[in-house]
Every structure is written in structure tokens, then in C-alpha cells.
Image: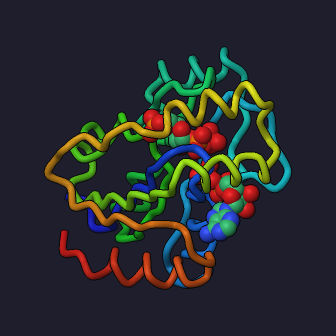
């Protein structure tokens, strides 16, 4: 049984997952973010992922280097298997996950809490445009996938509407997440 809690931040592209995770870590010493491995070049000001090639990703996956992995937006995403060490040591971890891997995440890490971020389509479109990382076509593709319903599972879900200043959201998220017993 892992002692730390895995806090999965999920929601559509552009909803503010990375921004909120950064603010939550600043708000709560002891809470850490997981550095994801992604087949996307490094991007300044982004989440600070570990960039890898397709071949590197596949080699790491084959040798059991990922606790969880998925495909989205034409990219591959992996969560390093090293998170088990942190969780085992009692550290709480925040991680940006696909809504599609929650069942797998809970099977491996029973102390999973899902922080589900929501926003109206207008807010999402505006945020993706402001971030400016994707081209217009990619933004349209991300907006189409925004509506995915959250699969039901045994994991507790905290839902947070993100239409508020990030500092306030971080405080609210910490309070809600730590109010849940796992
Ligand atoms: N609460 C917020 N209020 C206003 N703008 C926000 C808020 N959260 C995020 N943003 C902005 O929205 C854009 C997308 O946020 P980001 O954290 O990259 O989303 P995600 O990780 O979910 O794709 C960024 O430009 C960010 O500065
Ligand atoms: O299956 P879904 O729940 O739709 O999630 C698919 C991907 O989309 C999100 O990434 P997002 O586009 O927000 O961030 P990224 O920019 O890091 O790719 C999320 O972090 C997943 O990596």
C-alpha cells in the first residue's frame, strides 16, 4: 500500500491544469509535481516535461519505465515509474493525467484523488489562444475533445470550475483535496 497520495489533475486542454498545479505546489510545501515524459520538444514556459523521441519513448516503455502512458494530440505521454518511490516514502504527488487512464492509475495507486477542472467552451478557447502554443487547427482538435465525460470509478472526484484567479483556485483546490479521505 502506497502511503503518499496521487492527485490526478484532469480536464480539457487549456483548462489550466499546469497553471493550477504550479500554484498548488507553491501553496503547499511537501506537495510535488510529477515531471512527465512527452514526445514533444522542450517548450519554454511550459510544464517542464522531459522531451524524448518516439524511439526513446518506446524503448523506455518496453523496459517498464512508465507507471502509466497514453497517446493524445499525436503525442505520447508517460509518467515515470519512479513515482512509486515517492509515494512509498509518503510524499503526495500531483500529476497531469489523461482522463482515459484513471482506472489504471487507481488499480496501481489506490490512494488516488481526481481533481477535475472545468471551464466553459468560451473560456477554453480563449485560454488556448492566449497560451499560443498550438496552431489554429490543433486548437480546434483540442476543443473537440474537451467534452469527454469522466469515467465513473471508485476514486473520489473533486470538481473545480476554473473561472477564477489562479491563487484563489489553488487555495480552494488544496482545501477540497485534503478534505477527502482516501
Ligand atoms: N485561472 C486562470 N485564469 C486565467 N487564465 C488562466 C487560468 N488558468 C490558466 N490560465 C491560462 O490559460 C492558458 C492554458 O493554461 P494551462 O495551464 O497551460 O492549461 P492546461 O495545462 O490545462 O492545458 C495559459 O495561458 C494560462 O496562463
Ligand atoms: O484524454 P484526455 O483527458 O483528453 O487527455 C489527453 C491529454 O490531454 C491533456 O493534455 P493537454 O492538452 O492539456 O496538455 P498537454 O498540453 O500537456 O498536451 C492531458 O494532460 C493528456 O495528456
Residue farthest to the front, as pictured:
122
Instruction: Estimate the x, y position of residue 29 in percent, counting from the top left.
Output: 54, 83
Residue 161 in sight in this render: yes
Q: Is residue 4 left or right of residue 155?
A: right
Asked if residue 160 lies left or right of residue 96, the reply is: left
- Identify the residue at image location x=58%, y=44%: 13
Quadrant of the rendered image containing residue 67: top left
Q: Position of residue 85 (x, y in %)?
A: 41, 56
| Viewer-side residue, 103 vs 163 | 163
Quarter placement of the C terminus = bottom left
> Foreground: 128 or 9?
128
The residue at the point 35 percent across, 64 percent down is 159
In the rendered view, would you say 170 is above or below 102?
below
User: Residue 84's spot in the image, x, y percent?
Assistant: 38, 52
Residue at left offset 49%, top offset 39%: 146
Q: Evaluate whether residue 29 shows in this view.
A: no
Q: How is the image coloured?
A: rainbow
Amino acid at each position: 500500500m502506497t502511503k503518499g497520495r496521487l492527485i490526478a489533475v484532469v480536464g480539457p486542454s487549456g483548462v489550466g491544469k499546469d497553471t493550477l498545479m504550479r500554484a498548488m505546489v507553491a501553496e503547499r510545501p511537501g506537495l510535488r509535481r510529477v515531471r512527465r515524459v512527452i514526445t514533444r520538444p522542450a517548450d519554454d514556459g511550459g510544464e517542464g516535461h522531459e522531451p524524448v523521441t518516439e524511439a526513446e519513448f518506446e524503448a523506455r516503455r518496453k523496459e517498464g519505465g512508465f507507471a502509466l502512458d497514453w497517446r493524445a494530440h499525436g503525442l505520447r505521454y508517460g509518467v515515470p515509474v519512479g513515482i512509486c518511490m515517492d509515494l512509498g516514502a509518503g510524499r503526495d504527488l500531483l500529476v497531469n493525467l489523461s482522463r482515459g487512464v484513471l482506472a489504471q492509475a487507481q488499480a496501481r495507486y489506490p490512494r488516488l484523488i481526481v481533481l477535475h477542472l472545468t471551464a466553459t467552451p468560451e473560456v477554453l478557447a480563449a485560454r488556448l489562444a492566449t497560451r499560443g502554443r498550438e496552431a489554429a487547427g490543433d486548437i480546434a482538435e483540442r476543443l473537440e475533445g474537451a467534452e469527454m465525460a469522466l469515467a465513473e470509478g471508485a476514486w473520489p472526484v473533486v470538481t473545480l470550475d476554473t473561472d477564477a484567479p489562479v491563487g484563489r483556485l489553488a487555495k480552494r483546490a488544496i482545501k477540497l483535496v485534503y478534505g477527502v479521505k482516501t
